[in-house]
Amino acid sequence: MEEETVSLIVEGEEILVDKQTLTDRSQYFRAMFASGMREASQNSVVLHDVTANVIRELLNFFRTGQLTLDQSTTQEILTTAIFLQMDDVINHAKLNLSVENAVEMFTVANVHFLPDLEKATFRYLSRKYLELLKSETYDKLTEEQHEAILSLRFGGKDTICTIGSYDRDVHLTQDTPRTTHLLDENSGEWTPYCDVPSSFSTHACGVAVLHNYLFLTGGFTSFKSDQMQKSSLCFDVLTNKWRPFPAMTELRANFAFRRNIT
């Protein structure tokens, strides 16, 4: 069966589109074609206040599932998708957030009252807080947005955590696996939480907690204490994942962190 096409007239340019694609992907066109309007019978639709480039981007997304949402395109693409009631595009945006396009996402969410998109952006930034701190986006956010992001990072209850356990006989003869433990304040018992990656030695390392991230750095490569360790690790309690972190410029062991308030 031959596909029925629709001619979209955008900025004086004619773009031919499969009519079924528009019906399936856009509530705006679905309602138009079901209404008996002149455009439905003529299979020609003039679109105002949108650009041909954005329409092509959206049509390509329907074909390939690929959509570029960067600082220069996010607002225009999402605004057009909202106008044409293309829910798949908005859902795609929620799943393809980035630190770089977060400000644009907030703007679209506020202008068009999309609380789900705003919540998704806040949640994403709370999980990418280290990247956010190093980005230009950080300075573009409002004080209220900063507070909301941090509140999500500290959404749980305060917990005491330890790294590893000490056995006098084992400690002096071999390296042992290190496990983080959490204190149950009600029972007074320590329960295993997660293992420190075996590639990292916790002997005489430095430990710090900042913005609900756990940092391990420095120390010795083994129980022999004969070689300094260059690697560092960061644990994110929101994702329960360890990842490498830049090492200190000067290797140290048996030291403590101090936070300077300026």
Image: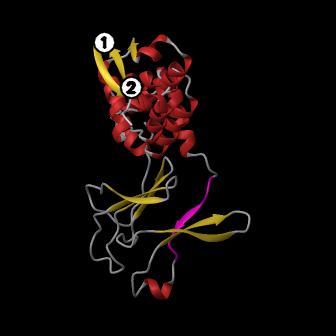
Q: Position of residue 165 (x, y in %)?
A: 52, 76
Q: Quick check: 164 above or below 130?
A: below
The quadrant of the rendering that contains the N terminus is top left
Is 65 in the magenta? no
Indicate left or right for 228 with 255 as reference. Answer: left
Q: Secondary structure at mark 2?
A: helix
Q: Are marks 2 and 1 in contact (CB under 8 Å)?
A: no
Give me the residue at 28% from left, 11% from top: 12
Q: CA distance from mark 2 to mark 1?
A: 16 Å
For label 2, the residue is: 77
Magenta: main secondary structure: loop
Indicate left or right for 79 with 152 as reference. Answer: left
Task: Spot the residue most to the front.
Answer: 1
Q: Amino acid at mark 2?
A: Ile
Give the residues drawn in magenta, as a range. 158-165
Q: Which mark is residue 11?
A: 1
Give me the residue at 52% from left, 41% from top: 123
Residue 136 appears anywhere in the view? no
Q: Which mark is residue 228?
A: none
Q: Amino acid at mark 1?
A: Glu
Q: Position of residue 246 (x, y in %)?
A: 30, 54
Task: Spot the residue most to the right.
Answer: 186
